[in-house]
Amino acid sequence: MNVKIRWIVIFSLILSSCTKPLTLQLNDIKKQLVVYSVFCLDSNIMINITESKNMNEVVTGMDDFETVENAQVFIYHNNKVVDTAFYYTDGNYYSNTKPLENNYYQLLIRADGYDEVKAEGFIPTKVKIDSIVKTEIEPKEYNVSIFFTDPPKEDNYYCIYMSGITQYYSTNNPSIGEWKVTDNIRPLFTDKLFQGEQYEVKFDVYVDNYEHYPDSSKYIEISLYSLSKEYYQFLQSYNKQIPKGNGGDDLQQVFMQGLIEPIPIYSNIDGGLGIFAGCSISADTIFFDNN
């Protein structure tokens, strides 16, 4: 899964005591490594590394982040080094490691001028889509039901994504709540209401006018993401920062708000900032025709 999200955290100011004023020099705050790595079952692990920003530095977009090109990046499995990631471009490091289901992986990063960074991520069980049922309501408008069976005796975290000829889709599912694609946030949910059972998630889907599309393009692909708890917590905190309906697909929307309060975006990076977490993806496709 190719995901390119640059990540920013605004440092909390140190409060002065009531008896002794404290002058904070923003330029003196040590820069940290910012790590973004979301790895998927049977796909090579990629790690993006940039440098954190201080409060007095202007951020107008993704290009304002300094990439880190001199890092040593080690991938561990069962507490043994299994790979050393190599630098490619734009702060991206690639490894030859393809993670396995229900396994933990560890990350160790060393770079001159920064604290050492460690993290651990997990690849959860791949939950397959059992079936998809589409019912036409009127031309170009459908109810689409996605059925899957939740693994028993474990907490599971999910996200659903659609691509293809869909123009708009929405839901009011009990586990997700009221959601529409123009909210620009991820439709996240857990198995709290259906643990160990088969479950249905129903969407209202509006498709493009596809009469002139080739037959091979008349489809919607539906992906069911099984998220690790860390990835779920990261996306949950990400969702809280994105103004609904503003469009876009990265944290630049946060930058444009005129930040006043610190942003509590979830991080599981020890010695730095960011996320190192896994997911598994199950996908299925529904097709349409001119009739």
Image: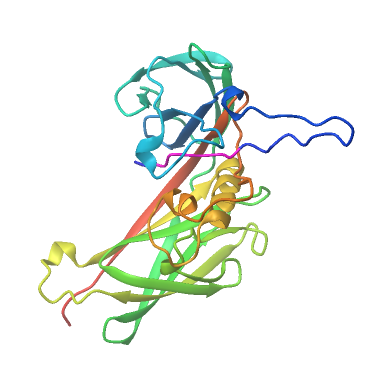
Residue 246 position by quadrant: bottom left
The percent position of residue 89, horizontal first and vertical second, equals 29, 26
Q: Residue at x 37, y 19 (%)?
A: 69
Q: In the rendered image of this protein, does residue 184 appear above or below residue 35?
A: below
The percent position of residue 116, horizontal first and vertical second, equals 57, 16
Outermost residue on the right side: it is 19
Residue 6 counted in the magenta span = yes
Give the colouring mode of the picture: rainbow
5 or 8: nearer the eye?
8
- Quarter of the rendering occupied by the N terminus: top left
Residue 219 position by quadrant: bottom left
Q: Is residue 11 visible?
A: yes
Side of 144 where 81 appears, left or right: right
The percent position of residue 172, horizontal first and vertical second, equals 54, 75
Q: In the rendered image of this protein, does residue 49 appear above or below residue 111?
A: below
Residue 237 counted in the magenta span = no
Q: Which residues are magenta?
A: 4-10
The percent position of residue 53, horizontal first and vertical second, equals 51, 33
Q: Is residue 127 visible?
A: no
- Quarter of the rendering occupied by the C terminus: bottom left
Outermost residue on the bottom side: it is 138
Q: Residue at x 66, y 64 (%)?
A: 193
Residue 83 position by quadrant: top left
**In terms of secondary structure, what is the magenta stretch mainly?**
loop
